[in-house]
Protein backbone atom coordinates (compact mmCIF):
# COMPACT_ATOMS: atom_id res chain seq x y z
CA UNK A 1 0.00 0.00 0.00
CA UNK A 2 2.82 2.38 0.91
CA UNK A 3 4.50 1.88 -2.45
CA UNK A 4 1.24 2.63 -4.26
CA UNK A 5 0.81 5.84 -2.29
CA UNK A 6 4.38 6.90 -3.08
CA UNK A 7 3.99 6.12 -6.78
CA UNK A 8 0.71 8.03 -7.07
CA UNK A 9 2.18 10.89 -5.05
CA UNK A 10 5.24 11.04 -7.29
CA UNK A 11 3.12 11.05 -10.45
CA UNK A 12 0.90 13.76 -8.97
CA UNK A 13 3.92 15.88 -8.03
CA UNK A 14 5.38 15.58 -11.53
CA UNK A 15 2.04 16.47 -13.13
CA UNK A 16 1.63 19.53 -10.91
CA UNK A 17 5.21 20.61 -11.61
CA UNK A 18 4.50 20.35 -15.33
CA UNK A 19 1.12 22.09 -15.33
CA UNK A 20 1.18 24.79 -12.67
CA UNK A 21 2.97 27.58 -14.56
CA UNK A 22 1.11 27.12 -17.89
CA UNK A 23 -2.13 26.98 -15.89
CA UNK A 24 -1.31 30.26 -14.14
CA UNK A 25 -0.50 31.88 -17.48
CA UNK A 26 -3.77 30.64 -18.99
CA UNK A 27 -5.71 31.86 -15.95
CA UNK A 28 -4.27 35.36 -16.20
CA UNK A 29 -4.83 35.58 -19.96
CA UNK A 30 -8.33 34.11 -19.81
CA UNK A 31 -9.39 36.44 -16.99
CA UNK A 32 -8.04 39.43 -18.91
CA UNK A 33 -9.92 38.36 -22.03
CA UNK A 34 -13.09 37.81 -19.97
CA UNK A 35 -12.92 41.35 -18.59
CA UNK A 36 -12.50 42.75 -22.09
CA UNK A 37 -15.41 40.70 -23.44
CA UNK A 38 -17.63 41.75 -20.56
CA UNK A 39 -16.98 45.38 -21.46
CA UNK A 40 -18.16 44.79 -25.05
CA UNK A 41 -21.75 43.50 -24.72
CA UNK A 42 -22.77 44.88 -28.11
CA UNK A 43 -20.07 42.92 -29.92
CA UNK A 44 -21.46 40.48 -32.47
CA UNK A 45 -22.22 37.05 -30.88
CA UNK A 46 -19.95 35.44 -33.47
CA UNK A 47 -16.95 37.24 -31.94
CA UNK A 48 -18.03 36.40 -28.40
CA UNK A 49 -18.46 32.73 -29.31
CA UNK A 50 -15.19 32.23 -31.17
CA UNK A 51 -13.15 34.18 -28.63
CA UNK A 52 -14.41 32.10 -25.74
CA UNK A 53 -13.99 28.88 -27.70
CA UNK A 54 -10.39 29.82 -28.55
CA UNK A 55 -9.58 30.58 -24.91
CA UNK A 56 -11.08 27.30 -23.71
CA UNK A 57 -9.30 25.15 -26.28
CA UNK A 58 -6.04 27.05 -25.75
CA UNK A 59 -5.62 25.35 -22.35
CA UNK A 60 -5.16 21.77 -23.64
CA UNK A 61 -3.51 23.08 -26.81
CA UNK A 62 -0.94 25.00 -24.77
CA UNK A 63 -0.03 21.96 -22.69
CA UNK A 64 0.25 19.81 -25.81
CA UNK A 65 2.45 22.48 -27.39
CA UNK A 66 4.60 22.58 -24.25
CA UNK A 67 5.09 18.81 -24.29
CA UNK A 68 5.94 18.95 -27.99
CA UNK A 69 8.41 21.80 -27.49
CA UNK A 70 10.09 20.01 -24.62
CA UNK A 71 10.48 16.90 -26.76
CA UNK A 72 11.65 18.95 -29.72
CA UNK A 73 14.11 20.88 -27.56
CA UNK A 74 15.83 17.59 -26.68
CA UNK A 75 16.17 16.76 -30.37
CA UNK A 76 17.22 20.31 -31.21
CA UNK A 77 19.74 20.31 -28.40
CA UNK A 78 21.39 17.18 -29.74
CA UNK A 79 21.51 18.57 -33.27
CA UNK A 80 22.59 22.06 -32.26
CA UNK A 81 25.49 20.81 -30.18
CA UNK A 82 26.76 18.35 -32.78
CA UNK A 83 28.96 21.04 -34.34
CA UNK A 84 30.67 21.72 -31.02
CA UNK A 85 31.14 18.01 -30.29
CA UNK A 86 28.71 18.08 -27.35
CA UNK A 87 25.81 15.67 -27.57
CA UNK A 88 23.25 15.18 -24.82
CA UNK A 89 20.60 12.53 -24.37
CA UNK A 90 18.72 11.17 -21.39
CA UNK A 91 18.39 7.91 -19.51
CA UNK A 92 15.03 6.22 -18.91
CA UNK A 93 15.51 4.43 -15.60
CA UNK A 94 15.12 6.82 -12.63
CA UNK A 95 17.60 6.71 -9.74
CA UNK A 96 16.60 4.90 -6.58
CA UNK A 97 14.95 7.35 -4.20
CA UNK A 98 14.08 7.13 -0.54
CA UNK A 99 12.23 9.83 1.38
CA UNK A 100 13.66 10.06 4.88
CA UNK A 101 11.85 11.85 7.69
CA UNK A 102 12.94 12.42 11.27
CA UNK A 103 10.00 10.20 12.26
CA UNK A 104 11.14 6.94 10.71
CA UNK A 105 7.93 5.11 11.54
CA UNK A 106 6.55 6.22 8.19
CA UNK A 107 8.29 6.78 4.86
CA UNK A 108 5.46 8.96 3.58
CA UNK A 109 5.75 12.67 4.28
CA UNK A 110 2.87 15.08 4.80
CA UNK A 111 3.64 16.65 1.44
CA UNK A 112 3.44 13.26 -0.27
CA UNK A 113 0.08 12.59 1.40
CA UNK A 114 -1.03 15.96 0.08
CA UNK A 115 0.00 15.06 -3.48
CA UNK A 116 -1.70 11.69 -3.05
CA UNK A 117 -4.89 13.40 -1.87
CA UNK A 118 -4.80 15.80 -4.83
CA UNK A 119 -4.51 12.83 -7.19
CA UNK A 120 -7.50 11.12 -5.54
CA UNK A 121 -9.67 14.24 -5.71
CA UNK A 122 -8.70 14.83 -9.34
CA UNK A 123 -9.43 11.22 -10.24
CA UNK A 124 -12.76 11.27 -8.41
CA UNK A 125 -13.85 14.40 -10.25
CA UNK A 126 -12.91 12.94 -13.60
CA UNK A 127 -14.63 9.66 -12.76
CA UNK A 128 -17.86 11.47 -11.81
CA UNK A 129 -17.96 13.47 -15.04
CA UNK A 130 -17.01 10.45 -17.11
CA UNK A 131 -19.76 8.33 -15.59
CA UNK A 132 -22.32 11.08 -16.15
CA UNK A 133 -21.28 11.50 -19.79
CA UNK A 134 -21.26 7.73 -20.30
CA UNK A 135 -24.82 7.43 -19.01
CA UNK A 136 -25.98 10.11 -21.43
CA UNK A 137 -24.05 8.48 -24.27
CA UNK A 138 -25.88 5.21 -23.60
CA UNK A 139 -29.20 7.07 -23.52
CA UNK A 140 -28.43 8.67 -26.89
CA UNK A 141 -27.67 5.24 -28.31
CA UNK A 142 -31.02 3.95 -27.06
CA UNK A 143 -32.82 6.94 -28.57
CA UNK A 144 -31.27 6.26 -31.95
CA UNK A 145 -32.51 2.68 -31.77
CA UNK A 146 -36.03 3.48 -30.57
CA UNK A 147 -36.81 6.54 -32.71
CA UNK A 148 -37.34 5.99 -36.46
CA UNK A 149 -35.06 8.49 -38.20
CA UNK A 150 -35.36 9.32 -41.90
CA UNK A 151 -33.72 11.73 -44.31
CA UNK A 152 -35.07 15.26 -44.55
CA UNK A 153 -36.50 14.52 -48.00
CA UNK A 154 -38.67 11.81 -46.43
CA UNK A 155 -39.86 13.97 -43.55
CA UNK A 156 -42.03 16.11 -45.81
CA UNK A 157 -42.98 19.81 -45.74
CA UNK A 158 -39.30 20.84 -45.58
CA UNK A 159 -38.82 24.21 -47.22
CA UNK A 160 -36.29 24.92 -49.98
CA UNK A 161 -33.90 26.92 -47.79
CA UNK A 162 -33.53 24.04 -45.35
CA UNK A 163 -32.98 21.54 -48.16
CA UNK A 164 -30.28 23.76 -49.65
CA UNK A 165 -28.66 24.21 -46.24
CA UNK A 166 -28.67 20.46 -45.65
CA UNK A 167 -27.13 19.91 -49.09
CA UNK A 168 -24.04 21.91 -48.04
CA UNK A 169 -23.20 19.28 -45.44
CA UNK A 170 -21.08 16.37 -46.71
CA UNK A 171 -23.10 13.75 -44.84
CA UNK A 172 -26.75 12.73 -44.90
CA UNK A 173 -28.72 14.44 -42.15
CA UNK A 174 -31.63 12.50 -40.66
CA UNK A 175 -34.54 13.66 -38.55
CA UNK A 176 -36.96 11.96 -36.17
CA UNK A 177 -39.89 12.83 -33.92
CA UNK A 178 -40.49 12.00 -30.28
CA UNK A 179 -43.92 11.99 -28.65
CA UNK A 180 -42.58 13.70 -25.53
CA UNK A 181 -42.49 17.49 -25.24
CA UNK A 182 -38.77 18.00 -25.83
CA UNK A 183 -36.60 20.87 -27.00
CA UNK A 184 -35.33 20.24 -30.59
CA UNK A 185 -31.93 18.67 -30.29
CA UNK A 186 -28.99 17.64 -32.49
CA UNK A 187 -26.35 15.04 -31.75
CA UNK A 188 -23.72 13.20 -33.73
CA UNK A 189 -20.89 14.39 -35.95
CA UNK A 190 -20.28 11.60 -38.43
CA UNK A 191 -23.99 10.71 -38.62
CA UNK A 192 -25.85 13.84 -37.47
CA UNK A 193 -29.49 13.50 -36.47
CA UNK A 194 -32.16 16.02 -35.48
CA UNK A 195 -34.76 15.04 -32.89
CA UNK A 196 -38.00 17.08 -32.75
CA UNK A 197 -41.16 16.97 -30.64
CA UNK A 198 -44.11 15.45 -32.50
CA UNK A 199 -46.15 18.60 -31.76
CA UNK A 200 -44.19 20.44 -34.45
CA UNK A 201 -45.49 18.11 -37.17
CA UNK A 202 -48.78 20.00 -37.17
CA UNK A 203 -47.12 23.38 -37.86
CA UNK A 204 -44.77 23.22 -40.84
CA UNK A 205 -43.55 26.78 -40.32
CA UNK A 206 -42.44 26.16 -36.72
CA UNK A 207 -41.00 22.79 -37.72
CA UNK A 208 -38.91 24.45 -40.45
CA UNK A 209 -37.71 27.12 -38.02
CA UNK A 210 -36.59 24.45 -35.54
CA UNK A 211 -34.93 22.43 -38.29
CA UNK A 212 -33.23 25.58 -39.62
CA UNK A 213 -31.75 26.21 -36.18
CA UNK A 214 -30.49 22.65 -35.80
CA UNK A 215 -29.15 22.55 -39.38
CA UNK A 216 -27.16 25.67 -38.58
CA UNK A 217 -25.59 23.87 -35.63
CA UNK A 218 -24.73 20.93 -37.87
CA UNK A 219 -23.24 22.97 -40.71
CA UNK A 220 -21.21 25.00 -38.20
CA UNK A 221 -19.80 21.75 -36.72
CA UNK A 222 -21.07 22.76 -33.28
CA UNK A 223 -21.36 19.17 -32.07
CA UNK A 224 -17.64 18.65 -32.72
CA UNK A 225 -16.59 21.82 -30.91
CA UNK A 226 -19.01 20.98 -28.10
CA UNK A 227 -17.29 17.60 -27.73
CA UNK A 228 -13.87 19.28 -27.53
CA UNK A 229 -15.18 21.60 -24.83
CA UNK A 230 -16.48 18.58 -22.89
CA UNK A 231 -13.07 16.90 -23.07
CA UNK A 232 -11.46 20.10 -21.81
CA UNK A 233 -13.95 20.27 -18.96
CA UNK A 234 -13.28 16.61 -18.13
CA UNK A 235 -9.52 17.19 -17.89
CA UNK A 236 -9.64 20.54 -16.12
CA UNK A 237 -12.88 20.28 -14.14
CA UNK A 238 -11.19 21.72 -11.06
CA UNK A 239 -10.66 25.15 -12.67
CA UNK A 240 -13.65 27.49 -12.08
CA UNK A 241 -12.90 29.48 -15.26
CA UNK A 242 -13.55 26.36 -17.34
CA UNK A 243 -17.14 26.14 -16.08
CA UNK A 244 -17.66 29.88 -16.41
CA UNK A 245 -16.38 29.94 -19.98
CA UNK A 246 -18.37 26.85 -20.93
CA UNK A 247 -21.63 28.38 -19.66
CA UNK A 248 -21.04 31.64 -21.52
CA UNK A 249 -19.93 29.72 -24.60
CA UNK A 250 -23.27 27.87 -24.70
CA UNK A 251 -25.13 31.16 -24.40
CA UNK A 252 -23.29 32.82 -27.24
CA UNK A 253 -23.39 29.69 -29.38
CA UNK A 254 -27.19 29.85 -29.36
CA UNK A 255 -27.18 33.61 -29.92
CA UNK A 256 -24.77 33.19 -32.82
CA UNK A 257 -27.03 30.48 -34.24
CA UNK A 258 -30.01 32.79 -33.87
CA UNK A 259 -28.28 35.52 -35.88
CA UNK A 260 -27.39 33.05 -38.61
CA UNK A 261 -30.97 31.77 -38.82
CA UNK A 262 -32.41 35.29 -38.90
CA UNK A 263 -29.92 36.52 -41.49
CA UNK A 264 -32.20 35.15 -44.24
CA UNK A 265 -35.20 37.08 -45.52
CA UNK A 266 -37.54 34.09 -45.21
CA UNK A 267 -37.52 33.99 -41.40
CA UNK A 268 -39.85 36.13 -39.29
CA UNK A 269 -38.09 37.33 -36.10
CA UNK A 270 -41.42 37.54 -34.31
CA UNK A 271 -42.39 33.94 -35.11
CA UNK A 272 -38.89 32.74 -34.31
CA UNK A 273 -38.99 34.44 -30.88
CA UNK A 274 -42.45 32.99 -30.32
CA UNK A 275 -41.12 29.50 -31.00
CA UNK A 276 -38.33 30.00 -28.43
CA UNK A 277 -40.91 31.00 -25.81
CA UNK A 278 -43.00 27.96 -26.67
CA UNK A 279 -40.00 25.69 -26.12
CA UNK A 280 -39.17 27.16 -22.72
CA UNK A 281 -41.20 24.70 -20.57
CA UNK A 282 -40.15 21.68 -22.63
CA UNK A 283 -37.58 19.12 -21.49
CA UNK A 284 -33.90 19.28 -22.43
CA UNK A 285 -32.81 15.70 -23.08
CA UNK A 286 -29.17 14.60 -22.92
CA UNK A 287 -28.18 18.16 -22.24
CA UNK A 288 -24.45 17.51 -21.79
CA UNK A 289 -23.86 15.54 -24.99
CA UNK A 290 -26.28 17.33 -27.30
CA UNK A 291 -26.66 20.66 -29.02
CA UNK A 292 -30.21 21.89 -28.66
CA UNK A 293 -32.27 24.92 -29.50
CA UNK A 294 -32.75 26.09 -25.91
CA UNK A 295 -29.61 24.80 -24.22
CA UNK A 296 -30.02 27.19 -21.29
CA UNK A 297 -33.43 28.67 -20.51
CA UNK A 298 -31.77 31.34 -18.35
CA UNK A 299 -30.46 33.19 -21.42
CA UNK A 300 -33.78 33.14 -23.32
CA UNK A 301 -34.66 36.73 -22.40
CA UNK A 302 -31.30 37.94 -23.66
CA UNK A 303 -31.73 36.01 -26.90
CA UNK A 304 -35.17 37.45 -27.55
CA UNK A 305 -33.88 40.99 -26.89
CA UNK A 306 -31.12 40.40 -29.40
CA UNK A 307 -33.62 39.08 -31.96
CA UNK A 308 -35.75 42.21 -31.56
CA UNK A 309 -32.71 44.46 -32.07
CA UNK A 310 -31.12 42.54 -34.95
CA UNK A 311 -30.80 44.45 -38.21
CA UNK A 312 -31.88 42.65 -41.36
CA UNK A 313 -29.16 41.58 -43.82
CA UNK A 314 -26.44 42.57 -41.37
CA UNK A 315 -23.27 40.77 -42.55
CA UNK A 316 -22.03 37.87 -40.42
CA UNK A 317 -18.30 38.39 -39.61
CA UNK A 318 -17.28 34.81 -40.35
CA UNK A 319 -13.75 35.40 -41.65
CA UNK A 320 -12.86 38.07 -39.12
CA UNK A 321 -14.20 35.97 -36.26
CA UNK A 322 -12.31 32.86 -37.36
CA UNK A 323 -9.15 34.94 -37.74
CA UNK A 324 -9.54 36.19 -34.16
CA UNK A 325 -10.19 32.60 -33.03
CA UNK A 326 -6.95 31.43 -34.66
CA UNK A 327 -4.85 34.29 -33.30
CA UNK A 328 -6.14 33.90 -29.73
CA UNK A 329 -5.79 30.11 -29.75
CA UNK A 330 -2.22 30.14 -31.09
CA UNK A 331 -0.96 33.12 -29.10
CA UNK A 332 -2.32 31.77 -25.81
CA UNK A 333 -0.99 28.27 -26.45
CA UNK A 334 2.44 29.60 -27.45
CA UNK A 335 2.57 31.88 -24.41
CA UNK A 336 1.83 28.91 -22.16
CA UNK A 337 4.42 26.70 -23.81
CA UNK A 338 7.31 29.12 -24.31
CA UNK A 339 7.09 30.81 -20.92
CA UNK A 340 7.41 27.50 -19.13
CA UNK A 341 10.47 26.61 -21.19
CA UNK A 342 12.37 29.37 -19.41
CA UNK A 343 12.14 27.47 -16.12
CA UNK A 344 13.63 24.20 -17.39
CA UNK A 345 17.18 22.88 -17.14
CA UNK A 346 19.15 20.31 -19.08
CA UNK A 347 20.62 18.99 -15.84
CA UNK A 348 18.36 18.91 -12.81
CA UNK A 349 20.86 18.96 -9.98
CA UNK A 350 18.38 17.21 -7.72
CA UNK A 351 17.87 14.33 -10.14
CA UNK A 352 21.23 13.95 -11.88
CA UNK A 353 22.45 10.37 -11.86
CA UNK A 354 26.11 9.87 -12.68
CA UNK A 355 29.09 7.64 -12.13
CA UNK A 356 32.73 8.70 -11.94
CA UNK A 357 35.45 6.64 -13.53
CA UNK A 358 38.92 7.90 -12.62
CA UNK A 359 41.97 6.84 -14.61
CA UNK A 360 44.12 6.27 -11.53
CA UNK A 361 47.26 5.00 -13.28
CA UNK A 362 47.03 7.24 -16.38
CA UNK A 363 47.00 4.38 -18.90
CA UNK A 364 43.73 5.45 -20.51
CA UNK A 365 44.65 9.09 -20.81
CA UNK A 366 41.50 10.70 -19.39
CA UNK A 367 39.10 10.68 -16.46
CA UNK A 368 35.49 9.96 -17.30
CA UNK A 369 32.11 11.09 -15.98
CA UNK A 370 29.22 8.84 -17.00
CA UNK A 371 25.82 10.52 -16.86
CA UNK A 372 22.50 8.68 -16.94
CA UNK A 373 19.41 10.83 -17.42
CA UNK A 374 15.73 9.97 -17.00
CA UNK A 375 12.64 10.76 -19.10
CA UNK A 376 11.54 13.27 -16.48
CA UNK A 377 14.86 15.05 -16.73
CA UNK A 378 14.68 15.07 -20.51
CA UNK A 379 11.45 17.02 -20.18
CA UNK A 380 13.31 19.62 -18.06
CA UNK A 381 16.02 20.56 -20.53
CA UNK A 382 17.25 23.92 -21.73
CA UNK A 383 20.59 25.34 -22.79
CA UNK A 384 21.83 26.68 -19.44
CA UNK A 385 23.93 23.73 -18.27
CA UNK A 386 25.18 23.10 -21.79
CA UNK A 387 26.36 26.70 -21.95
CA UNK A 388 28.18 26.20 -18.67
CA UNK A 389 30.08 23.23 -20.06
CA UNK A 390 30.77 25.00 -23.33
CA UNK A 391 32.09 28.04 -21.47
CA UNK A 392 34.73 26.01 -19.66
CA UNK A 393 38.30 26.35 -20.81
CA UNK A 394 38.85 23.97 -23.77
CA UNK A 395 41.68 22.26 -21.90
CA UNK A 396 39.35 20.85 -19.24
CA UNK A 397 37.13 18.67 -21.47
CA UNK A 398 38.73 16.40 -24.03
CA UNK A 399 35.44 15.16 -25.51
CA UNK A 400 31.75 14.74 -24.79
CA UNK A 401 30.14 11.82 -26.56
CA UNK A 402 26.84 10.03 -26.42
CA UNK A 403 25.85 6.40 -26.68
CA UNK A 404 22.30 5.77 -27.80
CA UNK A 405 20.06 2.84 -28.55
CA UNK A 406 21.59 -0.63 -28.77
CA UNK A 407 25.12 0.72 -28.35
CA UNK A 408 24.26 2.32 -25.00
CA UNK A 409 22.43 -0.80 -23.83
CA UNK A 410 25.35 -2.98 -24.90
CA UNK A 411 27.75 -0.98 -22.75
CA UNK A 412 25.50 -0.07 -19.82
CA UNK A 413 22.50 -2.38 -19.99
CA UNK A 414 19.03 -1.05 -19.24
CA UNK A 415 20.60 1.89 -17.42
CA UNK A 416 21.52 3.24 -20.84
CA UNK A 417 18.30 2.46 -22.67
CA UNK A 418 17.73 6.13 -23.55
CA UNK A 419 21.38 7.06 -23.87
CA UNK A 420 24.50 7.75 -21.87
CA UNK A 421 26.60 10.91 -21.83
CA UNK A 422 30.34 10.27 -21.62
CA UNK A 423 32.41 13.29 -20.56
CA UNK A 424 36.14 12.69 -20.88
CA UNK A 425 38.23 15.24 -18.99
CA UNK A 426 41.91 16.09 -18.89
CA UNK A 427 43.94 13.95 -16.50
CA UNK A 428 44.65 16.91 -14.26
CA UNK A 429 42.80 16.92 -10.93
CA UNK A 430 41.78 20.56 -11.48
CA UNK A 431 40.14 19.84 -14.84
CA UNK A 432 38.27 16.85 -13.49
CA UNK A 433 36.96 18.66 -10.40
CA UNK A 434 36.06 21.76 -12.42
CA UNK A 435 33.73 19.66 -14.58
CA UNK A 436 32.30 17.90 -11.51
CA UNK A 437 31.55 21.22 -9.82
CA UNK A 438 29.94 22.54 -13.01
CA UNK A 439 27.56 19.57 -12.84
CA UNK A 440 26.85 20.25 -9.16
CA UNK A 441 28.98 17.38 -7.78
CA UNK A 442 31.55 17.35 -4.97
CA UNK A 443 35.24 17.60 -5.68
CA UNK A 444 37.31 14.40 -5.49
CA UNK A 445 40.79 13.91 -4.07
CA UNK A 446 42.74 12.16 -6.84
CA UNK A 447 45.93 11.98 -4.81
CA UNK A 448 44.68 8.77 -3.13
CA UNK A 449 45.82 5.40 -4.35
CA UNK A 450 43.50 3.56 -6.68
CA UNK A 451 40.96 1.81 -4.41
CA UNK A 452 39.99 -0.54 -7.27
CA UNK A 453 43.51 -1.63 -8.12
CA UNK A 454 43.86 -5.14 -9.54
CA UNK A 455 40.09 -5.71 -9.63
CA UNK A 456 37.73 -6.02 -12.58
CA UNK A 457 34.72 -3.80 -11.91
CA UNK A 458 31.85 -3.76 -14.40
CA UNK A 459 29.45 -0.93 -15.17
CA UNK A 460 26.97 -3.20 -16.94
CA UNK A 461 26.34 -6.90 -16.58
CA UNK A 462 23.83 -9.47 -17.69
CA UNK A 463 22.16 -9.48 -14.27
CA UNK A 464 22.49 -6.39 -12.07
CA UNK A 465 22.80 -6.66 -8.27
CA UNK A 466 19.54 -7.02 -6.35
CA UNK A 467 19.14 -5.29 -3.01
CA UNK A 468 18.08 -7.86 -0.43
CA UNK A 469 15.06 -6.64 1.50
CA UNK A 470 14.39 -3.88 -1.03
CA UNK A 471 14.75 -0.19 -0.34
CA UNK A 472 13.20 -0.66 3.08
CA UNK A 473 16.37 -2.44 4.23
CA UNK A 474 18.32 0.81 3.84
CA UNK A 475 15.36 2.97 4.86
CA UNK A 476 15.25 1.32 8.28
CA UNK A 477 18.90 2.07 8.93
CA UNK A 478 18.89 5.78 8.19
CA UNK A 479 18.41 8.29 10.99
CA UNK A 480 17.97 11.99 10.32
CA UNK A 481 21.04 13.68 11.86
CA UNK A 482 20.00 16.04 14.64
CA UNK A 483 22.48 18.66 13.47
CA UNK A 484 20.97 18.63 9.96
CA UNK A 485 17.48 18.74 11.42
CA UNK A 486 18.22 21.73 13.65
CA UNK A 487 19.91 23.55 10.75
CA UNK A 488 16.98 22.85 8.43
CA UNK A 489 19.21 20.96 6.01
CA UNK A 490 17.48 18.72 3.51
CA UNK A 491 18.28 17.43 0.04
CA UNK A 492 19.70 14.48 -1.82
CA UNK A 493 22.92 12.62 -1.03
CA UNK A 494 24.49 10.47 -3.74
CA UNK A 495 26.43 7.44 -2.57
CA UNK A 496 28.52 5.58 -5.13
CA UNK A 497 29.99 2.17 -4.32
CA UNK A 498 30.93 -1.23 -5.66
CA UNK A 499 28.88 -4.36 -5.04
CA UNK A 500 31.49 -7.11 -4.85
CA UNK A 501 31.24 -10.76 -5.78
CA UNK A 502 29.86 -11.62 -2.34
CA UNK A 503 27.14 -8.97 -2.56
CA UNK A 504 28.78 -6.66 -0.02
CA UNK A 505 29.11 -2.88 -0.40
CA UNK A 506 32.76 -1.87 -0.77
CA UNK A 507 34.52 1.41 -1.53
CA UNK A 508 31.47 3.58 -0.75
CA UNK A 509 31.90 7.32 -1.20
CA UNK A 510 29.67 10.36 -1.40
CA UNK A 511 29.77 11.93 -4.86
CA UNK A 512 27.41 14.70 -3.84
CA UNK A 513 26.37 15.68 -0.36
CA UNK A 514 24.42 18.23 1.63
CA UNK A 515 26.41 18.40 4.88
CA UNK A 516 25.04 18.55 8.40
CA UNK A 517 25.98 14.93 9.03
CA UNK A 518 23.62 13.65 6.34
CA UNK A 519 26.51 12.57 4.09
CA UNK A 520 28.03 10.42 6.81
CA UNK A 521 24.63 8.96 7.76
CA UNK A 522 23.85 8.02 4.14
CA UNK A 523 27.29 6.47 3.77
CA UNK A 524 26.84 4.45 6.98
CA UNK A 525 23.38 3.17 6.01
CA UNK A 526 24.43 2.18 2.49
CA UNK A 527 27.54 0.41 3.79
CA UNK A 528 25.29 -1.95 5.75
CA UNK A 529 23.28 -2.96 2.67
CA UNK A 530 23.47 -6.49 1.35
CA UNK A 531 22.95 -7.44 -2.33
CA UNK A 532 22.57 -10.53 -4.37
CA UNK A 533 25.72 -10.18 -6.48
CA UNK A 534 25.74 -9.24 -10.13
CA UNK A 535 26.16 -12.08 -12.60
CA UNK A 536 28.10 -12.13 -15.85
CA UNK A 537 28.35 -15.29 -17.94
CA UNK A 538 27.09 -17.33 -15.01
CA UNK A 539 29.61 -16.07 -12.44
CA UNK A 540 29.44 -13.31 -9.81
CA UNK A 541 31.32 -10.11 -10.61
CA UNK A 542 32.02 -6.69 -9.09
CA UNK A 543 29.82 -3.84 -10.36
CA UNK A 544 29.45 -0.08 -9.86
CA UNK A 545 26.28 1.15 -8.18
CA UNK A 546 24.82 4.53 -7.14
CA UNK A 547 22.00 5.26 -4.69
CA UNK A 548 20.54 8.73 -4.09
CA UNK A 549 19.04 9.20 -0.63
CA UNK A 550 16.63 12.05 0.02
CA UNK A 551 16.57 13.74 3.39
CA UNK A 552 13.32 15.69 3.70
CA UNK A 553 11.93 17.53 6.70
CA UNK A 554 8.23 17.67 7.56
CA UNK A 555 6.43 20.83 6.46
CA UNK A 556 6.16 22.15 10.02
CA UNK A 557 9.96 21.99 10.51
CA UNK A 558 10.95 23.74 7.32
CA UNK A 559 12.25 27.27 7.65
Image (cartoon, grey):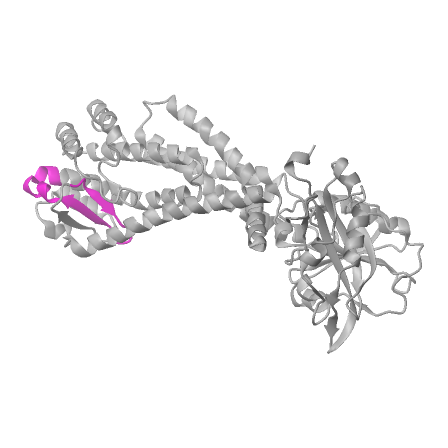
> Is 161 displayed left or right of 229 in the figure?
left
Which residue, as the protein is rendered here, is positioned at the far left?
202
The structure residue drawn at horizontal position 60% and vertical position 41%, both measured from the top left corner, is 111
> Taking the image as drawn, is residue 404 in sight?
no
How far across and down, in percent of the image, does residue 474 sit?
A: 72, 56
Please say if 186 is above or below 312.
Answer: below
How far across and down, in percent of the image, does residue 553 sit?
A: 68, 40
Instruction: From the viewer's side, name the closer residue of 364 and 533.
Output: 533
Q: Is residue 167 magenta?
A: no
Quadrant in which the C terminus is drawn? top right
Instruction: From the viewer's side, name the closer residue of 362 and 139.
Output: 139
Instruction: From the viewer's side, name the closer residue of 524 and 62.
Output: 524
> Is 364 displayed left or right of 132 in the figure?
right
Residue range corresponding to the magenta coloring: 182-207
> Is 519 displayed left or right of 211 in the figure?
right
How far across and down, in percent of the image, does residue 481 sit?
A: 77, 43
Quadrant in which the N terminus is drawn? bottom right
The structure residue drawn at horizontal position 19% and vertical position 47%, both measured from the top left corner, is 194
Instruction: From the viewer's side, name the closer residue of 104 and 41.
Output: 104
Q: How many marks?
A: 0
The structure residue drawn at horizontal position 75% and vertical position 48%, both measured from the top left corner, is 493
Q: Quadrant of residue 311?
A: top left
> Taking the image as drawn, is residue 273 in sight?
yes
How far across and down, in percent of the image, does residue 425 sit?
A: 84, 54
Which residue, as the protein is rendered here, is positioned at the far front?
105
> Is 217 displayed left or right of 489 in the figure?
left
Q: Is residue 205 magenta?
A: yes
Amino acid sequence: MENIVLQISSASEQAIHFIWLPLVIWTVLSFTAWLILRSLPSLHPQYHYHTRLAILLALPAGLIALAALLGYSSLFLTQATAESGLKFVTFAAPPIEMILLPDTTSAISILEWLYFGIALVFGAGMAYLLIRLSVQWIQIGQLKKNVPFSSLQQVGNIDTVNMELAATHPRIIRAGFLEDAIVPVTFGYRKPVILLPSSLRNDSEKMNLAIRHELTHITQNDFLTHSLVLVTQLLFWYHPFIHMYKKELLDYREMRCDTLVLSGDSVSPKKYASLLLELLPMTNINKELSVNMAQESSNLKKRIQMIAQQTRNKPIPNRASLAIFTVILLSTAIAMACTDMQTQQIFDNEDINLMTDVDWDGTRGFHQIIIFMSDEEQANQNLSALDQLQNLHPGHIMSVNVLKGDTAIEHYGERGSDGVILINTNLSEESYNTVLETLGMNRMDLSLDDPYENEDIFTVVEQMPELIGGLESIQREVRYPESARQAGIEGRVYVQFVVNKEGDVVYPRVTRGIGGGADEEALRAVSLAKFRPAMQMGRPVNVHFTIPIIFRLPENERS
